[in-house]
Amino acid sequence: MDLEEDAVGNLVALGLARYEARVYLALVRRESYTAAEVAREADVPRQRVYDVLDALVRRRLANAHTGRVATYSAVAPELAMTRLMALQRESLERLERASGALAATLQPLWSDGRGHTDPLDYVEILRDPAVISERFADIQRQARHELLSFCKPPFVAPAENAEGIKAARRLHRGGGTVRAIYTSGALEDAGMLANVRSFGEAGEEARFTTDLPLKLVIADASVVLCDMPDPVAGAGSTTALVIEHSALAACLRLAFLTVWESAATVPEPIEVLNS
């Protein structure tokens, strides 16, 4: 039984339907069968066996013999397999021609599509604080030369911002620049002040000002992350934009450096907390 099932499976793989495979295997066992006999031998419904036999004859895998009662016999297996393989090759050649023609038709469309991009595909809009925090961490991890930041509460990153400290240390050791401008009022919290000191030890240069217009990160003069308070949703709601645009980043970098020049190196809250 296993041998017969294997043979049926192989014939199906060569392109026969399962009933066709079973009828052909029945035919090879004897010189000829009537339709009723082969239906019983192959366990194929009698109402289907005539269609199956006709299909085998059309494929030249079986021969029909006329007489008072029509009989059927199998073509020699070697010849039958050769014919099945020829049919498979013809089918494969047709598929190859069809696939080649389809590829030739679609290639220009694909190539043309590569030149069409969303005019704002360099802008990401983020609203989930967890997503904003993770994207901020990514920008810090990927920075290679420079990180500039406007820092003001509320902060979406963890207070200790381990990724930021690692990035500051890495950039500082590599000769890069890490600068942050903090709002003086944010440092009235002792925990925040400790965080600023940790960043300073990692190589960040810090300055302080009374107020900042928004939270901002500029990485390598090419990527900008800015926090946009939502005037419609109300207090506490925010939308962050990640913009990969070197011209905009260069413009905001100039704005950062302008604020940097006028910012204080040591704010009053630090002097008070140090005393």
Image (cartoon, grey):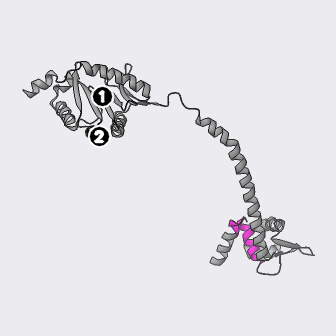
Residue sitting nearer the eye, 175 or 210: 175
- Where's the C terminus, which quadrant? top left
Q: Position of residue 83 (x, y in %)?
A: 78, 69
Q: Position of residue 257 (x, y in %)?
A: 30, 22
Q: Position of residue 153 (x, y in %)?
A: 26, 26
Which residues lie in the magenta part? 11-29
- Where's the N terminus, which quadrant? bottom right
Question: Can you identify the residue that label 1 sits on?
Answer: 149
For residue 212, say whether it is visible.
Answer: no
Q: Secondary structure at mark 1?
A: strand
Q: Quadrant of residue 224?
A: top left
- Which of disc 1 and disc 2 is earlier in sequence? 1
Examine the structure image and report whether residue 19 is included in the region drawn in magenta.
Answer: yes
Q: Residue at x 73, y 50 (%)?
A: 98
Which residue occupies the extreme left position in the image? 275
Q: Secondary structure at mark 2?
A: loop
Q: Amino acid at mark 2?
A: Gly
Q: Main secondary structure of the magenta part?
A: helix
Q: Quadrant of residue 181?
A: top left
Q: Quadrant of residue 220?
A: top left
- Checking the image for residue 174, the label placed there is 2
Horizontal arrangement in the rendering, residue 38 relative to residue 223 (left or right): right
Residue sitting nearer the eye, 36 or 6: 6
Q: Position of residue 217 (x, y in %)?
A: 33, 29
Which residue occupies the extreme bottom position in the image? 30
> How many numbered marks are there?
2
Q: Residue at x 67, y 76 (%)?
A: 4
